């Protein structure tokens, strides 16, 4: 024969379930919010240089942006010495987002692949230290050019200094709860409301005089 719960027993069970749900609700809500929130930890720096001197008399100058993980908006120009010995037809090049693309350089370096048809035409900047701190670093450069006349010219530079300036701070993303977390929050509010209603009912119930 099934056992029937009295009103007081049922109320006691509901109170225990409600109490348990309340104890778990903050943890669930916090976990849900933390899984979808992000925080930025790096600033965007613009790195500039102008004292690059290549072994054949050429030079380079320019700048690029770095956010701690990615290079972008580079604007670098290399200059060739007129009538350079052995490679008189090799010209300088302007590297930007339309005339070049990022390649895989490896290590602390920026590798720019030229978009002028030569598969081996590139400029690579090597950094003596990480750019993450924004402190000045020493660098060197290597450029390879297949000229229209067929000359395969590669030249490297002496060391030069790169300096940076902070352009902007990466904004911190505010926590945004997922829909499931919002549903859990509404469920928790309903439990709170039910518990408050039961307390009010118990308070308002008339007491029976035993005498």
Image: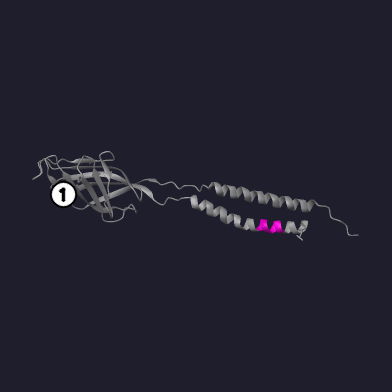
Q: Residue furthest left?
A: 85
Residue 206 x, y percent position in the rendering: 83, 52
Say if 97 sits above or below 40 in the image.
Answer: above
**Image point (55%, 46%), residue name:** 179
- Which quadrant of the view contains residue 64? top left
For the record, the magenta segment spans 13-19
- Which quadrant of the view contains residue 95? top left
Residue 23 x, y percent position in the rendering: 62, 58
| Residue that mark 1 sits on | 155
Q: Residue furthest front?
A: 1
Relative depth, front residue between 136 and 21:
21
In what quadrant of the picture does the C terminus appear? bottom right
In this rendering, position of residue 2 left or right of residue 56: right
Residue 79 x, y percent position in the rendering: 17, 42
The figure's colour scheme reads one colour
- Which quadrant of the view contains residue 121? top left
**Image point (27%, 38%), residue name:** 98
Q: Secondary structure at mark 1?
A: strand
Residue 194 x, y percent position in the rendering: 70, 50
């Amino acid at each position: 024969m099934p056992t029937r719960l009295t009103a007081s027993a049922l109320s006691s069970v509901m109170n225990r379930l409600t109490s348990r749900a309340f104890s778990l609700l903050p943890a669930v809500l916090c976990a849900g919010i933390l899984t979808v929130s992000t925080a930025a930890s790096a600033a965007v720096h613009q790195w500039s240089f102008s004292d690059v001197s290549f072994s054949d008399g050429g030079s380079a100058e320019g700048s690029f942006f770095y956010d701690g993980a990615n290079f972008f908006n580079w604007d670098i120009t290399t200059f060739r010495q007129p009538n350079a010995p052995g490679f008189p037809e090799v010209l300088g090049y302007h590297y930007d987002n339309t005339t070049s693309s990022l390649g895989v350089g490896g290590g602390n370096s920026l590798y720019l692949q030229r978009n002028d048809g030569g598969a081996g035409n590139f400029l690579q900047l090597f950094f003596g230290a990480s750019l993450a701190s924004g402190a000045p670093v020493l660098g060197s450069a290597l450029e390879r050019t297949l000229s229209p006349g067929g000359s395969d010219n590669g030249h490297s530079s002496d060391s030069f200094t790169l300096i940076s300036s902070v352009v902007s701070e990466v904004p911190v993303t505010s926590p945004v709860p997922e829909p499931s977390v919002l549903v859990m929050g509404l469920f928790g509010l309903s439990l709170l409301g039910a518990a408050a209603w039961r307390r009010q009912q118990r308070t308002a119930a008339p007491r029976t005089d035993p005498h």
